Amino acid sequence: MVNSVFTMSDFDDLPIAKTLAKMSLESKREVDTPETTTEESVREDHKEENPANHIVFTKTLKRAQVGGVPGRSILKPAEPSSNTTIASTTRSGGMEKRREVSFHAIHIRHHEMILGDNPACSIGPPIELAWEYQNEEKHDLDIYEVERRPRRKLRHLVLSYYRRKDILLQAGYSENEMKSVERQIGKLKRQRKTTGFFLPIQKMEEVVQSAGRKVRRVAGGKKKEEH
């Protein structure tokens, strides 16, 4: 009787031996692999993939060993801070420069009232402010806001016919000058009414003229083709 001695190398070519060796190697890798991932590694990987993104993600990573398959990672964006400043900022060399506008003083100029030529005036001579001003006052903005009078309503800003005429008389204008301006304003008002009356007709004329030009172009093109 011959005693035969077998070694593991003799079974390398067998399919069963290969399968057992492969399963042993995979089980060893699973034991060596850690089950949890630290927050620092996730944050570093996120920065390498998106270096321009400064949003901090909170990590909730859990690996559930259900059937040998690890669970998915859950990345939740962090909520914006309550002290976020809404302003125009620029980033230069890693530093943010904030742009802001501020006011410190208010300048008040006193202009004279002169005889105007605005045809929108309903009745009587119109008045307007002159380009030249007499003097200029400078006030601190905070003090001015505390001491200024309340804002007037629209009806208080309207000047009546008699009030405007009195202002112009005190400024040195005569009755004849005011009557002359009133006649010029009346003429401008009539011209405006005439323009408003014929405006729809003018638009219709423009449409007819445009259609006529198109017809002439088409007719001219056909004549050239015939020749």
Image (tube, rainbow, N blue to C red):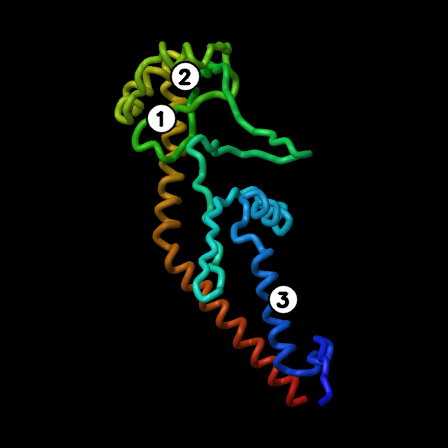
What residue is at 56 percent from the left and 52 percent from the top?
34
- Are dots 3 and 2 in contact, CB under 8 Å? no
What residue is at 57 percent from the left and 64 percent from the top?
27
Camera-side residue: 87 or 31?
Answer: 31
Between the C-alphas of marks 3 and 2, the distance is 111 Å
Residue 47 vertical position relative to residue 32 in the rendered view, above or below: above
Q: Earlier in the sequence, mark 3 or mark 2?
A: 3
- Image quadrant containing the C terminus: bottom right
Helix, strand or loop at mark 1: loop
Helix, strand or loop at mark 3: helix
Q: Earlier in the sequence, mark 2 or mark 1?
A: 1
What residue is at 53 percent from the left and 73 percent from the top?
214
- Are dots 1 and 3 in contact, CB under 8 Å? no
Q: Which mark is residue 25?
A: 3
Helix, strand or loop at mark 2: loop
Q: Is residue 11 left or right of residue 130?
A: right
Residue 40 vertical position relative to residue 140 in the rendered view, above or below: below
- Are dots 2 and 1 in contact, CB under 8 Å? yes
Which residue bears the numbered disc 1? 125
Q: Which three-letter amino acid code belongs to the residue tagged 1?
A: Pro
Camera-side residue: 49 or 96?
Answer: 49
Which of label 3 and label 2 is nearer to you? Answer: 3
Q: Looking at the image, which residue sits at the far front? A: 1
Question: Horizontal and vertical percent for residue 210?
Answer: 50, 68
Q: Which mark is residue 204?
A: none
Which residue bears the numbered disc 2? 173
Residue 142 vertical position relative to residue 219 in the rendered view, above or below: above
Between the C-alphas of marks 1 and 3, the distance is 105 Å
